[in-house]
Image: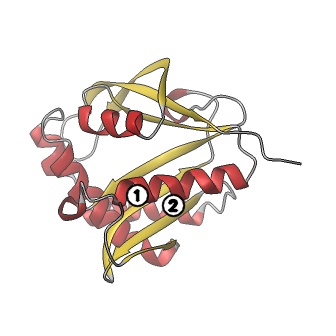
């Protein structure tokens, strides 16, 4: 059940700082058991805003859609879809959209916020006529993987080694792909 006072609205360029803040805080909290501490310590909100989120909104791709969640007016989480590429970690099966990111602020985790955000993104993908939605996650991200599986997603067997770099030394980690097939829309 979603938290009381939850509101989800489309996000835009004016939300880049809020999204970057949640993104960094969420990663530092949720990834601490399987990502190097120096990598997590190197993440910063301004860097994420400038290098990741401002370009995301500026790209203007129709498939790039994001939503912000607020609980009692407090920024609590976000989800973002992205135009899939044909290869690498952003690849998706034909006709699928790519779930680029989903994060909840640490203080809102475990309260139904992620499920509400995920349902919002999936409903949009379905309304847009996508055959399904794909996402990638670190193979050691057990909490996220259990969440996706509870929400009906399944592994499709695709794996990719991803090089992570920020201010610290780069490192490589294995990611796995989850997919959610969508029912065809009635004509």
- Pointer 2 residue: 55
Who's the residue at 48% across and 35% down the image? 152
For residue 162, which quarter of the picture?
top left
Give how far across and how far down residue 2 sits, in percent. Answer: 36, 64
In the displayed structure, would residue 42 be above or below residue 37?
A: below
Who's the residue at 57% across and 42% down the image? 98
Who's the residue at 33% across and 58% down the image? 112
Q: Residue furthest top?
A: 157
For residue 72, which quarter of the picture?
bottom left
Q: Is residue 43 left or right of residue 182?
A: left
Badge count: 2
In the displayed structure, would residue 80 be above or below residue 31?
A: below
Query: Are circles 1 and 2 on residues that touch, CB within 8 Å?
Result: yes
At label 2, counting other C-alpha atoms closer than 10 Å, the crowd grade (few under 14, some 14-19, many 20 or more) is: few
In-front residue for pair 144/173: 144
Give how far across and how far down residue 136 sits, in percent. Answer: 44, 34
Mark 1 and mark 2: span between their CA atoms?
A: 7 Å
Q: Give the SS element for disc 2.
A: helix
In-front residue for pair 68/59: 68
Q: Give the SS element for disc 1.
A: helix
- Pointer 1 residue: 51
Q: Is residue 187 left or right of residue 74?
A: right
In the displayed structure, would residue 128 be above or below residue 170?
A: below
Give how far across and how far down residue 71 sits, in percent. Answer: 32, 75
In the displayed structure, would residue 46 be above or below residue 137?
A: below
In-front residue for pair 171/116: 116
């Amino acid at each position: 059940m979603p938290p009381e006072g939850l509101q989800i609205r489309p996000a835009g360029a004016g939300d880049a700082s809020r999204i970057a803040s949640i993104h960094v805080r969420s990663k530092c909290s949720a990834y601490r058991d399987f990502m190097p501490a120096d990598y997590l310590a190197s993440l910063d909100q301004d860097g994420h805003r400038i290098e990741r989120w401002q370009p995301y909104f500026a790209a203007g791709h129709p498939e790039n859609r994001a939503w912000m969640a607020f609980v009692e007016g407090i920024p609590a989480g976000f989800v973002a879809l992205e135009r899939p590429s044909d290869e690498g970690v952003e690849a998706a099966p034909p006709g699928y959209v790519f779930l680029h990111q989903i994060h909840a602020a640490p203080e809102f985790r475990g309260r139904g916020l992620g499920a509400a955000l995920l349902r919002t993104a999936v409903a949009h993908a379905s309304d847009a006529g996508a055959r399904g939605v794909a996402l990638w996650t670190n193979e050691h991200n057990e909490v996220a993987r259990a969440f996706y599986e509870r929400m009906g997603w399944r592994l499709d067997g695709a794996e990719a080694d991803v090089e992570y770099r920020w201010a610290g030394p780069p490192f490589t980690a294995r990611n796995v792909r989850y997919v959610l097939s969508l029912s065809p829309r009635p004509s």
